[in-house]
Amino acid sequence: MKTTLDEMQAFIAVVDCGSITAAAVRLDQTISATSRTLGRLEEKLQTTLLRRTTRRLELTEEGKAFLERARPILAAVEETEELMSRRRNQPSGLLRVDAASPFMLHAIVPLIAGFRERFPQVELELNSNEGIIDLLEKRTDLAIRIGHLKDSTLHARLIGNSRIRVLAGPAYLAARGTPENVADLSRHALLGFNQPEALNEWPLLDENGLPLHIQPAIRSSSGETLRQLALNGAGITCLSDFMTRADRRDGRLCELLQRHTQDVRQPINAVYYRNTALSSRIQSFIDYLVEAIGARGFD
């Protein structure tokens, strides 16, 4: 397309105002700039749109035809810009969010009713994958990643952090006893992850003063599965506060080795494509998570 929107706008302003001088005032331009824009448009179209006399401007037949088609084009662009402005102020449309099932169930789901009340025009699709997904392949707008991020082509925003603790259920402790020190763990059934192996590093120090790396008796890819195993007395596990806060509060899980536990917190980030303009619906969801989690925390 040779013609620009600025040229269409200048042409329509000249027609509506009746003179280049008045059009320049409306467009907040100099008279010479408006005149040059009009001349450039006619040169591109290789036709005369306006006849200029000392007293007034008069549309040619070509000018009338161009005006008839240019007005709805400019009006459509202005309407679209207004729509985008409204969407920025009132987010809308479909937002696809991905998070590991424990974070989805324990951290995101309790916030959804409040988010929808504030942003009723945002439609949500909530998906859970235990591993790291390709956002483009999975058609995902936003993903929640727990733990330290590797170098990535993704934008990331920290929305909070969550401490990890060593835990067991009362039934298991009643049957097997409570470990008094780190060495005692070798005599217990430990529940851990099958991947990534880094999640089997607990916030305790071994006999060499190094972070304790456990060998699980039972492994799972899901923190929620480990939580359920611990609740059902299968062993001792190490999980993040975001999924065990209510269990600890209500006595369903007991924190162990508190004196020996290091204060280790997992960062929680919202990630989205670096080459994607941050839409208002993505921004609104991230802001809501930051506000809710920052105010509430997981301790």
Image (cartoon, rainbow, N blue to C red):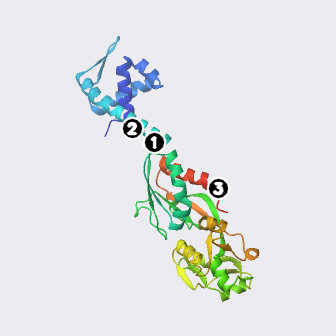
Residue type at mark 1?
Arg
Asked which quadrant contains residue 206, the reply is bottom right
Q: Give neighbour class at mark 2: few <14, some 14-19, many 20+ (Cα, 10 Å).
A: few
Callout 2 secondary element: helix
Tell me, yes or no, whether the two marked residues, 3 and 1, touch with CB atoms within 8 Å: no
Does any portion of residue 283 appear in the rendered image?
no
In the rendered view, would you say 78 is above or below 167?
above
Which residue is most to the top? 55
Residue behind mark 1: 87
The residues tagged by marks 2 and 3 sit, at their Cα atoms, a distance apart of: 39 Å
In the rendered view, would you say 217 is above or below 299?
below
Near-viewer residue (295 or 281): 295
| Image coordinates for residue 72, horizontal then vertical, percent | 31, 31
Q: Going from the N terminus, do you reach mark 3 or mark 1 first?
A: 1
Asked which quadrant contains residue 239, the reply is bottom right
> Which image quadrant: the C terminus?
bottom right
Near-viewer residue (183 or 141): 183
> Which image quadrant: the N terminus?
top left
The residues tagged by marks 3 and 1 sit, at their Cα atoms, a distance apart of: 29 Å
Which residue is most to the left? 61
Near-viewer residue (175 or 290): 175
Residue behind mark 2: 80
Q: Give neighbour class at mark 3: few <14, some 14-19, many 20+ (Cα, 10 Å).
A: few
Residue type at mark 3?
Arg
Q: Nearer the viewer, mark 3 or mark 1?
A: 3
| Image coordinates for residue 228, horizontal then vertical, percent | 55, 74
